[in-house]
Image: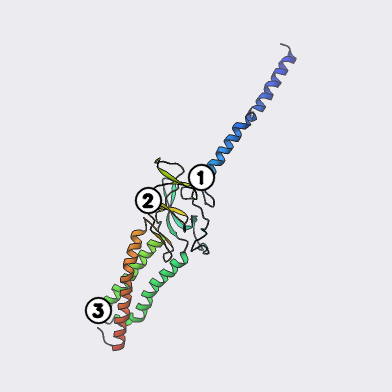
Amino acid sequence: MSADDAKEVTAESNDLEQQSPTTNPTAAAATTTQSDLSKSKESPSGAAGNGPYSYPTTKSKYSMSGDIGPPPCYKRQVGRFYVCVDKKVDGVEIPCCMVGPCWPMMLLTMSLILGAGAISSGIFGQFLVRSVTGIIVLSVGLSLVLFTAVSFGCTACRNPGIYPRQLENTSGDMIWHEETKSFRPRRGVMHDNETRVLAYQIDHFCPWTGTLIARDNMPYFQAFTGSLLCACIGVGAICVIGLTMAVSNTPI
């Protein structure tokens, strides 16, 4: 082989090497399309982030809280929940402390609970502390108010049981939910139109607590509703007995 022939063969091999990365446009397009489909499946419309708790943040057409904006301070949004604190489990950030879309009503209800105890004890406490019976009534009444406020706070600010989005039919008997782009079990997990999430054992959406009542905050909700009546009786006793002692100017 002559020197000229050797140069031509070398030049042809160099041209083939330069063309090889782009010689299969069909495969490249297929790879791009598959990647785009994967991204669209992982991130539903309006969702924040790509984790299992990335739910749509859009408002429902018939939402009772549609005109309420976000609170002044929060970490991230999961559906229409505003997450303040996460806990990391196996590398996944699970919402721990949050408020619902009707968070102003939650603040109003908490103010009414604490305000009733503070006003009644502030006005009549000076008369109740004059006797042992009055001190007992004051202590029991304020304890009931405090317990009611704590159970209410746990109801309103706890994760109600949000179901992490599933991109695969792991059990083989799951239903695809188009709005959240997630599979869900046929039973036990439903979609809440107000908060825009899937949750375990949904009971109802409570505007007074501002949040969804479901599996994980139901015990606190039951404690709140049960203690609320007792707190009302306690505050009433503070007012009645305190007023009686104030009018008669004698301890009971």
Mark 3 vs 1: CB contact within 8 A:
no
Q: Earlier in the sequence, mark 1 or mark 2?
A: 1
**Cα–Cα gap, marks 1 and 2:** 23 Å
Residue found at the very far top of the displayed protein: 1
The numbered disc on residue 133 is 3
Q: How is the image coloured?
A: rainbow
Mark 3 Cα shell of 10 Å, populated few (<14), some (14-19), many (≥20): some
Give the residue displayed 33% in from the left and 73% down from the top: 232
Q: Quick one: 165 or 1, which is closer to the camera?
A: 165
Q: Tell me where residue 11 appears, x and y as whole percent.
A: 71, 21
Q: Earlier in the sequence, mark 3 or mark 1?
A: 1
Circle 1 residue: 42
Give the amino acid at mark 2.
Answer: Gly
Give the amino acid at mark 1.
Answer: Glu
Q: Quick one: 130 or 134, which is closer to the camera?
A: 134
The relative height of residue 127 versus residue 110 in the rendered view (above or below) is below
Give the amino acid at mark 3.
Answer: Thr
Mark 1 Cα shell of 10 Å, populated few (<14), some (14-19), many (≥20): many
1 or 2: mark nearer the eye: 2
Q: Tell me where residue 8 appears, x and y as whole percent.
A: 72, 18
Q: Earlier in the sequence, mark 3 or mark 2?
A: 3
Circle 2 residue: 188
The relative height of residue 135 versus residue 83 in the rendered view (above or below) is below
**Cα–Cα gap, marks 3 and 2:** 50 Å
Give the residue displayed 31% in from the left and 86% down from the top: 246
Give SS at disc 3: helix
Q: Quadrant of the C terminus?
A: bottom left
Give SS at disc 1: helix
3 or 2: mark nearer the eye: 2
Give the residue displayed 61% in from the left and 32% down from the top: 26
Locate residue 179 relative to residue 251 in the image: left or right: right
